[in-house]
Amino acid sequence: MKNIAVTKWILQRVSAVILLPLLLWFLFIFLNLVKQDYQNIVLFFQDDIKFIITLVFLIISFFHMKIGMSEIFEDYIQNSRYKSVANLLMTAFATVLPLLTIVSLFFIIK
């Protein structure tokens, strides 16, 4: 059990360090995209580098969120059944939402 806690702690910190430059990129680029029309947004995502950086940002963001939320559930939910359900729902959310976003992006750029 102690090994799992240390691994989660390390993964949380590593994902936070990776997310910091990605978040700065996201804020800088995507705030400009809000002002663009649909065609310019499609052109933006058709650039392979930008598309891959966006995918990495999405995946690591949801991974980071899932680890953080599971630790919150661990600390504040006493009933093990409720804790298991909350973790299951969070895992489903952290898996399905990024996948839907990635599939949507693929459909947009095609």
Image (cartoon, helix red, strand yellow):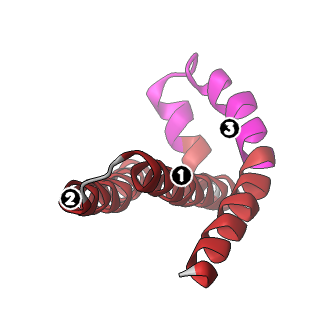
Q: Is residue 10 magenta?
A: no
In the image, which disc is placed on residue 85? Answer: 2
In the image, which disc is placed on residue 26? Answer: 3
Q: Dot 3 surroundings within 10 Å: few (below 14), some, or many (20 or more)? A: some
Q: Measured along the vertical axis of the image, is residue 16 above or below residue 8?
A: above
Q: Earlier in the sequence, mark 1 or mark 3?
A: 3
Callout 3, which amino acid?
Answer: Phe
Depth order, front residue of 62/43: 62
Q: CA distance from mark 3 to mark 2?
A: 32 Å
Q: Measured along the vertical axis of the image, is residue 108 above or below residue 37?
A: below
Residue 104: x percent and y percent? 34, 51
Q: Earlier in the sequence, mark 1 or mark 2?
A: 1
Residue 72: x percent and y percent? 47, 48
Q: Is residue 30 magenta?
A: yes
Depth order, front residue of 32/6: 6
- Image quadrant where residue 64 sits: bottom right
In the rendered structure, the answer to whether residue 3 lies left or right of residue 37 reads right
In the image, which disc is placed on residue 32? Answer: none
The mark closer to the camera, 3 or 2, is: 2
Q: Dot 1 surroundings within 10 Å: few (below 14), some, or many (20 or more)? A: some
Contact flag, marks 1 and 3 (Cβ < 8 Å): no
The residue beneath circle 1 is: 68
Callout 2, which amino acid?
Answer: Val
- Image quadrant where residue 6 sits: bottom right
Residue 39: x percent and y percent? 49, 33
Q: CA distance from mark 1 to mark 2?
A: 16 Å
Depth order, front residue of 49/1: 1
Q: Which residues are magenta?
A: 21-42
Which quadrant is the C terminus positioned in? bottom left
In the rendered structure, the answer to whether residue 59 lies left or right of residue 96 reads right
Mark 2 residue element:
helix
